[in-house]
Amino acid sequence: MMQRFFILAFCFLAVSGLWGQKTSKADQLYFEYSYQEAITAYKDEMRKYKLSSQQELNLAEAYFKTGQYDQAAEAYMEVYKKDSLMTNTQFNTMLQALSRTSGPERAKAYLNTRTNLVSQALLQNATFNYETLEDASAANTGYTIIETNLNSPQSDFAPAFYGPDRLLFSSGRPTKSKPNYNPSAESYLSIYSVSAEANFKAVQPTPFAMIPETDYHQATPYYSESLKQVFYVQSNLEDGELAFDENGKNALGICRAGQNGSFDLLFRDYSTSFYYPFYDETSGRLYFAADFGEGYGGTDLYFVYSNNGQIMSEPVNLGPHINTPGNEIAPFLFDGSLYFSSDAFYGLGGMDIYKSEIQEGDFYSIPVNLGPGINTNKDDFGFIIRKAKEEGYEGYFASNRPGGRGSDDIYAFTALEKPGLKTLAFRGTIRDQSGLGIEKAYVRLYQGDSTLIKETYTSMDGEFRLEIPMRDSVRVALGKQGYETVDLGNTATDQNLISGQPLDISLTALERIVVRQSNRILVRMDDFHFERNSKSLTPEITTILDEAAGQLKKFPGLRLQVEAHTDSRGYKSTNQKLSEERGIVIRDYLIAQGVAPEVFTEVKGFGETQIVNNCSDGVYCLDMLHKQNERYLFIVLNYDEL
């Protein structure tokens, strides 16, 4: 189980000094990780008095830690019904228990009761992974899993490449130099080196000689080929002995050691443990897991900028799509992807391994569960990968799945393709023409012309992101009631759509292209005039109509009535016919410029029957006054619908 490698193996607590307040016997057993004994003690105390909400949560967690998921789910739900101060991390564990006992549908139902308290990123992660895990065709299960011969009856985990033919790993196997670690009944963790040739049959693991030896935890190595240094975690020490914070807690710091005997303590906080350092050779970033108490849940993934491994910045959280209310550990970057492990409730169970694509601007795509094979309903973690010598890929990970030698075992794998589902990710901002974000604009993905695949809506600041399993051809459309509809085209013909670059879209509001006149809504358009007794379009007219066509094409849902009016000069019958013909010419020109024919429901010519001034038959008027009566109006018939 997770506490085997993550809590029991790492977090040594001096319980006698941990709690200043008075605790019950059950509480003390719980904080000593004696979960089964704590369950018995809590049950006994329940017969005497009512447990506090915190004790009820402790009992629920103890059930979960001991694999009694039915009881854990029931205990968590009893607390949840009371509207207690259940944290999102505890809520995540409750959903895990429900998933294990009742399936994902019940977990989804409870998730829907808390949508206002969890992030949109978490909801997107959950929806995406539920869908892909249910879709067998979307899962990439082309792995070959290989049992290795390096495992012992104790915990063996955190594999790390050490040159082309060797592997580093962490183990609780007994040593002559280190005492046993009481909570796990294993030795304090050590780092070992072993030849990876012949599936580890040739050479027995030996203690890794590059790091200074201590009597306490040393684990989760990462070897940097470029720096010729190893990064790892070890128990915080003072003068060779465990160092504790004011609450009696001993935590883990990040160290690095070099082949020349150099040693640096990079991170140390007596109250915070750091886990699984990973040094990115390209960016110089040092990644790790930690629980600073201000993240998204338990342990989160962070990075710091470094200069050849020397820390140069404050930690940067990888954000809510990577970090969840659960625990995230073991970051590993390879070929533009971030692999890591998480116990988020929407996985297969326990810790699962996920992959997220890294795009411009430190944007991480929705993490995708690697699926059955690599992941099981147990704990799967510490995934590393590289290109194989001949073809495909190879790597290692740890798991406590049945059939191993110890509580955690290291497995090898090979794959012809890079593990992890390929996705299409779209993100960006939708703004109005003033530059402000538009809230609740839709973004829709279509297969072909009309089959809707997925839809999302923008946030308050107009931002959106939408991801689906990779498809060859997807059409992207977006808009909002009262705004134009934009068709971004097809991913098969526009590679910019799948480049990962953020999209910045400006939508024109319908209000900007219309004007109210009396009790009617008209399309806003400059005045124009035909030559006397002519129905031919002049360059001046086509310039104005081209501009109008550009606006009308943004709103294919518009329904317009075209009205044409002449002045009073000439015969009434001639003007009537001329207005009708001009209206038709205007409509046909706009259709030729790409405006949908269905936009125009009717064309009406009124001739000189609706004069707007005194320039009627027989009245002398200046030319400019006669031109006031020649006008062409686009009446919006369905404004309220749009």
Image (tube, helix red, strand yellow):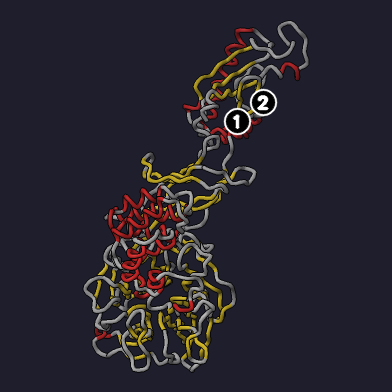
Res 24 → quadrant: bottom left
- Residue at 56%, 21% in the rendered image: 562
Q: Position of residue 409 (x, y in %)?
A: 29, 77
Q: Quadrant of the N terminus?
A: bottom left
Judged from the image, the secondary structure of the residue bearing numbered disc 2 is loop
Q: Which amino acid does label 1 sit on?
A: Leu
Judged from the image, the secondary structure of the residue bearing numbered disc 1 is helix
Query: Is residue 62 shown left or right of residue 437?
Result: left
Q: Which of marks 1 and 2 is nearer the N terminus?
A: 2
CA gap between label 1 and label 2 equals 9 Å
Query: Is residue 170 shown left or right of residue 22?
Result: left
Q: Where is residue 473 in the image (x, y as percent from the top left)?
A: 37, 49
Q: Where is residue 35 in the image (x, y as percent from the top left)?
A: 34, 70
Q: How many labels does the image show?
A: 2
Q: According to the image, label 1 marks what residue?
A: 545
Q: Is residue 460 depicted above or below 56 in this figure?
A: above
- Residue at 29%, 70% in the rendered image: 415
Q: Is residue 491 depicted above or below 356 in this figure?
A: above
- Residue at 46%, 77% in the rendered image: 277
- Between 469 and 60, the residue placed more toward the observer is 60
Do labels 1 and 2 touch, CB within 8 Å? Answer: yes
Q: According to the image, label 2 marks what residue?
A: 528
The extreme left residue here reads 403
Q: Which amino acid does label 2 sit on?
A: Phe
- Between 475 and 119, the residue placed more toward the observer is 119
Query: Is residue 500 shown left or right of residue 164?
Result: right
Q: Where is residue 414 in the image (x, y as percent from the top left)?
A: 28, 72
- Between 36 and 501, the residue placed more toward the observer is 36
Query: Is residue 212 shown left or right of residue 583?
Result: left
